[in-house]
Amino acid sequence: MLKTQFRKLIFTIYLLLLATLLNGCLYYDETPIRDIVINFSTMQTQTIAVGADHFMFIDNDNNLFAWGGNSYGQLGNNTTIDNYRPVHIMSNVVSVSSRGRHVMAMQTDGSLWAWGNNEFGQIGDGTTTNRYSPIHIMDNVVYAYAGFGHTMAIKSDNSLWVWGANSSGQLGTGTEIAKHQPVHIMDDVVAVSGSGLITAAVKSDGSLWIWGRIDFTRLADRTYTGQLYPIHIMNNVAAVSTGMSHVAIVKTDYSLWAWGLNGVGQIGDGTTINHYNPVHIKDNVVGVLAGVGNTMAIKTDGSLWAWGANFDGELGDGTIQNSLRPIHIMDNVVDISIDMGATLALRADGSLWGWGFFNNPLLRSDVPEPPPRDAYNFEDYFYIHGRIYTPTKILDGVKLPIQR
């Protein structure tokens, strides 16, 4: 009798252990992927931005400031006059994005506003007229990304909307016709990137989808024509960033992978050989940003690493030598923005740092005297040097990014 009861007890314990193990396997296999993707670096607000020739930041009171070139109205202050110092653009802003000469800003209520160059309809107001001040585009937005000629936005229901340039099918609409207003592309999206002619999105299940000029990467069907619809590439992806001709991703195990053109070492594998399939670059990475010809990554310890093109000192290592492998730049970094030879980095204490080539009146060497100072106290050398080769503090009080 006791032996029978003992066997039943052992069998019961076995079943309980098995059930626990299976539940753990299911939890590991399914739930964490969605949790990691949603809470990793997706739909994180962007509080700093580097455009083609202008710079932006959001302060702790949700005020948006901008300075630099303004030929297309990209500063948003209702003029086309370049500005020597940061000027206030709008209030109640939680996120800003700009990779070209148009800007997307998201307010605290989820409304999306845009201004600047509108040559391809990338503003999204139904026209191709440049806008010199913020114009309302849509509501219920949790993330927006302003590429060089097209724009992407994720709404609160995780639907992805795109508009603007479409010469290589980068909108994913099935045509190569530009769209001047937001067009719905796909659902269940938690991350999107599209700097040049390539667009990439991550879904909540960790699947990566890419469309546009995929001949830079030769993935999927390995053709050399524009991919007009999103195609599935791989799984277990948490974050993605597209450069002009390469793609970088962070997987759910925090490993960094990259592929595409590699003429200046932007892949980071120690060579200049183009790679048409993902190459493992680094581990313990929580964020990545692919630039025009370079790449930057933030590791779990807050250290910033950079590699690739360095013609203007944009890597921040004190040289103008390209780097074929990741090199350590600085620590305690929570966000970065790079474009056209200039870099901005935000540290955990809210300080904003910059380096590279700042091609605007504020930082050009031909400005004889600095303009009057205000609360945002720029250092003297920012008025007399166009290139800075190491991270240099610009100001304090920048808002830290948050998850949406």
Image (tube, grey):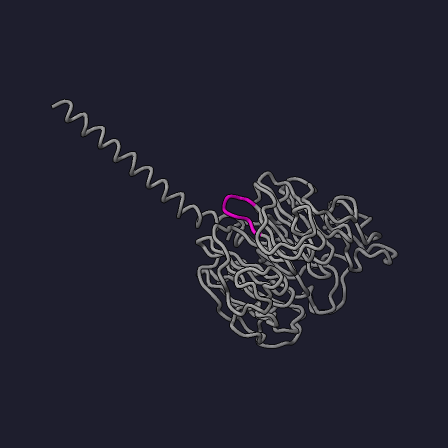
Q: Position of residue 271 (x, y in %)?
A: 69, 48
Residue 201 seen in the current view: yes
Q: Residue at x 65, y 72 (%)?
A: 118
* Residue 111 position (above or below residue 310): below
Queried whether the magenta region covers residue 252, the answer comes back as yes
Q: Residue at x 74, y 60 (%)?
A: 68
Queried whether the magenta region covers residue 267, the answer comes back as no
Residue 38 seen in the current view: no
Q: Position of residue 78 (x, y in %)?
A: 69, 69
Q: Position of residue 166 (x, y in %)?
A: 59, 71
User: In the rendered image, which quarter contains the N terminus?
Assistant: top left
Q: Position of residue 106 (x, y in %)?
A: 56, 60
- Is residue 114 left or right of 203 when viewed as pictured? right
- Is residue 329 left or right of 359 when viewed as pictured? left
The boundaries of the magenta stretch are 249-255
Q: Residue at x 19, y 27 (%)?
A: 7
Q: How many marks?
A: 0
Q: Quadrant of residue 357?
A: bottom right
- Is residue 11 left or right of 232 when viewed as pictured? left
Viewer-proximal residue among 127 and 203:
203
Q: Quadrant of residue 215?
A: bottom right
* Residue 374 position (above or below residue 186): above
Viewer-proximal residue among 179 and 47:
179
